[in-house]
């Protein structure tokens, strides 16, 4: 069956209906680890398909086994880029997810949800250091998030001073006789 993302913690228990006593138990978790107790705790650290095999042995040496198939899915990895599509409005930004293995997105800025798609735009009301969060998931099961702080700067302000002509220096005309 489908299960959660790594690390996946499991509690394994002998729930068999045995007639008589069981002399030994063996759990093989399918990832190279095993246990010899009737109940076992195990964590799957990486994504993959596993066959957890449980076997029990009676005092007469009769062996009974059962297999539990597990699918531990890969976790998404949240990441995003941003750009300023209009340089005349630097407080408006385009956000683009570059996440791996994601099929669901939630963007947040200034404590508000601002989008649920792979890309979104947002216009900040104020300038300065602003927080943007991206939460991603895959199939609604596995989640990851990333936070970035963006420096939002105001438009450059232009000021024109009244133009004055450069000062003129008058020279006294000189007359020369020859």
Image (tube, grey):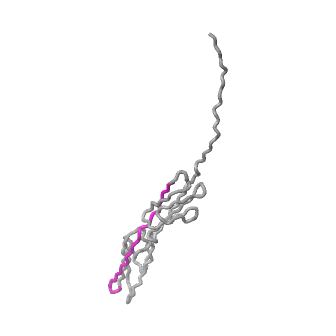
Q: Quadrant of residue 123?
A: bottom right
Q: Position of residue 114 (x, y in %)?
A: 54, 64
Q: Quadrant of residue 159?
A: top right
Looking at the image, which is closer to me, 85 or 173?
A: 173
Q: Position of residue 118 (x, y in %)?
A: 46, 63
State how many labels appear: 0
Looking at the image, which is closer to me, 142 or 16?
A: 142
Which residue shows up at 36% across the image and 75% down it?
A: 51
Looking at the image, which is closer to me, 132 or 124?
A: 124
Horizontal side of 3 relative to 127 (left or right) equals left
In the picture, the quarter occupied by the N terminus is bottom left
Against 90, residue 17 (above or below) is below
Against 74, residue 38 (above or below) is below
Q: Position of residue 63 (x, y in %)?
A: 33, 83
Chain part drawn in magenta: 58-84
Against 80, residue 13 (above or below) is below
Q: Position of residue 152 (x, y in %)?
A: 57, 54
In the picture, the quarter occupied by the C terminus is top right
Horizontal side of 61 relative to 103 (left or right) equals left
Q: Is residue 80 magenta?
A: yes
Q: Is residue 128 magenta?
A: no
Which residue shows up at 64% across the image and 35% down it?
A: 164
Which residue shows up at 35% across the image and 83% down it?
A: 57
Q: Quadrant of residue 166?
A: top right
């Amino acid at each position: 069956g489908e299960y959660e993302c790594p690390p996946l913690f499991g509690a394994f228990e002998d729930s068999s209906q045995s007639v008589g006593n069981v002399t030994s138990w063996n759990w093989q978790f399918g990832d190279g680890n095993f246990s010899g107790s009737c109940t076992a705790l195990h964590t799957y650290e990486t994504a993959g398909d596993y066959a957890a095999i449980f076997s029990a042995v009676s005092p007469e040496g009769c062996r009974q086994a059962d297999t539990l198939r597990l699918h531990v899915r890969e976790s998404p990895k949240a990441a995003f880029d941003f750009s300023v599509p209009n340089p005349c409005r630097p407080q408006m930004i385009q956000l683009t997810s570059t996440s791996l293995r994601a099929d669901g997105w939630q963007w947040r800025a200034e404590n508000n949800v601002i989008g649920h798609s792979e890309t979104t735009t947002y216009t900040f009301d104020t300038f300065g250091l602003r927080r943007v969060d991206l939460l991603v998931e895959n199939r609604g099961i596995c989640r990851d998030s990333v936070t970035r702080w963006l420096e939002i700067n105001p438009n450059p302000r232009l000021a024109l001073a009244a133009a004055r002509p450069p000062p003129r220096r008058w020279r006294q005309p000189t007359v020369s006789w020859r």
